[in-house]
Image (tube, rainbow, N blue to C red):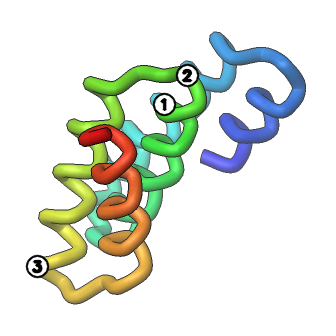
Amino acid sequence: MHAGWALWLLGRPAQAVKKSGDGLALARTLAHPATVANVEVFVACLQQWCEELGAVEQLVSSAVSISTAHDFAYPRTMASMLAGWALV
């Protein structure tokens, strides 16, 4: 997920989205709830920068669900803020 952000900042959005997708797939394979929720939030931020509303909505919905089930305050809060952006 951090490599995706780095690629975005280097001006390589297509590579950033691909790398972030790879990171998200790995996180989901590991099936560690805290990791998945945090990666979903980071990838949702990147998708926000790309103005991909549908992707943001899907990612934050999942992150909020996982975070609520496991009482993870940070990813739940970040996902809620991104959900607000998507709503507006």
**Residue 50 figure quarter:** top right
Is residue 34 something one can see in this rendering? no
Q: Quadrant of residue 65?
A: bottom left
Question: Which residue type carries mark 2?
Answer: Cys
- Find disc 1 in the rendering and name its residue: 47
Find residue 81 and report its horizontal and vertical position in percent. 39, 60
- Residue ranking furthest to the front: 88
Residue receiving disc 3: 69
Q: Look at the picture and state if 32 lies above or below 40.
A: below
Q: Quadrant of residue 20?
A: top right
How far apart in space, not on screen, are marks 1 and 3 (Cα)?
24 Å
| Three-letter code, disc 1 | Gln
**Residue at x 43%, y 79% (from the top left corner):** 74
Q: Position of residue 66 (x, y in %)?
A: 18, 67
* Residue 87 placement, left or right of 8: left
Image vertical order of residue 47 relative to residue 14, above or below = below
Give the percent coordinates (x, y) of residue 29.
Answer: 30, 47
Viewer-proximal residue among 62 and 36 = 62
- The structure residue drawn at horizontal position 26% and vertical position 24%, both measured from the top left corner, is 54
Q: Are marks 2 and 1 in contact (CB under 8 Å)?
A: yes
From mark 2 to mark 1, how far is it between C-alphas?
5 Å
Q: Earlier in the sequence, mark 1 or mark 3?
A: 1
